[in-house]
Image (cartoon, helix red, strand yellow):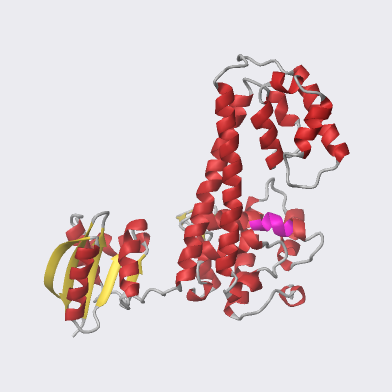
Amino acid sequence: MRTVFGIDVSKHTISLAIVVNKVKVDERKLTLDRPGLDNLLKLLKTFHQPEVVFEATGIYSRTLQHFLDYNNFEYTMLNPLAAKKQLDSLRPYKTDRADALNLAQTSFIIQRSLSYKQTPVYEQLHDLSRFYQEVSRDVVNHKNRLHRALQLTFPQLESLFSNTNNELYWTIVNHFACPSRALKLSATELRSFILHSTNKNISIDRATHIAEKLLTLAKKAYPVVNDNSYVYEQIAYLTNRVIEEVHEKEKIISEMQHEAEGLSEYNLLLTIPGFGVRTVTSLIGELGDIRRFHSSNALNAYIGIDLRHYESGNFVATDHISKRGNAIARKILFKSIQNIAVAGHFHPNHINDFYQKRKKQSSQPGTKKIAIAAIHRLLRTIYHLVKYNQPYNYQIAKV
């Protein structure tokens, strides 16, 4: 006797259909909370080795997934696109109740494999990776708002450093966004402020240069708001947010490193030239346990860089990547290719060899397509290293 539980998950409830040997025996709606899940557990224990199938619905299906993992039930969690393709032909109308029943009934027609159960550390890394991305977006948002505010007070301040991504710059902006405040101090007083405003080693000559340049810029400034304008409070608020968020990002990476250090792939991926702690931990967080993929092509599809080909009659479209996958992982990998290219000047690697060769051969502007091809090679390398537990070796990889 084969029993299938088809479940459609929504924000507060789950629609359940129980099908035994292709015959519906029960149908009900349960709340997605402890009482509802307790009732589901009783139903699951009523049958011998029940199969469970449901569609992944982001954060809402996480509750059901955790419940099934905790109670040691195997399940099939369908990708939303796969579920849509499988159920569309059976949907004369769409309701949660009908979806649950269709999920159960199609399990007798379609051969579905069980979902791979990852260890909890991958879920923790995934959550931390998404938190890191959220904080990064907040930093960009606050920097953009700060840029707009500085145009009203002291736009020249943005040229004080060649790179404004450092805490000393934000501290100076916080205190001297109003140029008259800087002009009230001498170069010696400003130098003392700069020396005491950073934990990094900075020479007296360097601090003197910054102080003198700050005074020069302040003399050129022409604020369009009064010295007591609320804009300065806004700038102080934004700089404090940026400083806090940058520290939070560092803390998240430290936590991710602590979580990932016990995984064998962590040290393996660090052997790839151009890969640092942030790249490796973020990739593991987004890709999860790479061993669950049956091939590197499946890994490509998961990320969304598998090629799509279309032709009809005499028309043949240009091949393009599907982009149906993990957009954050794609972003990390694109950045990784840039890092690999930089590291290639000091540490040879076959991916950079391929990337540079294609750049020289290309007659078209831009490197996006070349980067995508390089990502394919990078993913094959990552898959091989993790699958076979091998560190990166340039002499072997370049063959």
Examine the residues drawn in magenta and state their main secondary structure: helix
Q: Which quadrant holds residue 3?
A: bottom left
Whether residue 242 is situated above or below residue 57 in the rendered picture: above
- In the image, taking residue 304 as reference, residue 115 lies left or right, namely left
Q: At x 60% / y 48%, what residue is drawn? A: 247
x%, y% of residue 4? 22, 75
- In the image, taking residue 300 as reference, residue 27 lies left or right, namely left
Q: Is residue 20 visible?
A: yes
Q: At x 18% / y 75%, what residue is drawn? A: 42
Q: Where does the N terminus fall, quadrant-wise?
A: bottom left
x%, y% of residue 207? 82, 36
Q: At x 57% / y 33%, what residue is drawn? A: 238
Q: Nearer the viewer, residue 289 or 158?
A: 158
Q: Is residue 316 visible?
A: no
Whether residue 332 is situated above or below residue 86 in the rendered picture: above
x%, y% of residue 154? 68, 22
x%, y% of residue 324? 46, 57
Q: Nearer the viewer, residue 371 or 180?
A: 180
Whether residue 82 is situated above or below residue 130 in the rendered picture: below
Q: Which quadrant holds residue 206?
A: top right
Q: Residue furthest left?
A: 25
Q: Nearer the viewer, residue 134 or 193?
A: 193
Q: Where does the C terminus fall, quadrant-wise?
A: bottom right
Residue 252, magenta (yes or no): no
- The stretch of residues the image draws in magenta is 336-341
Q: Residue furthest right?
A: 205
- In the image, taking residue 146 as reference, residue 397 lies left or right, namely right
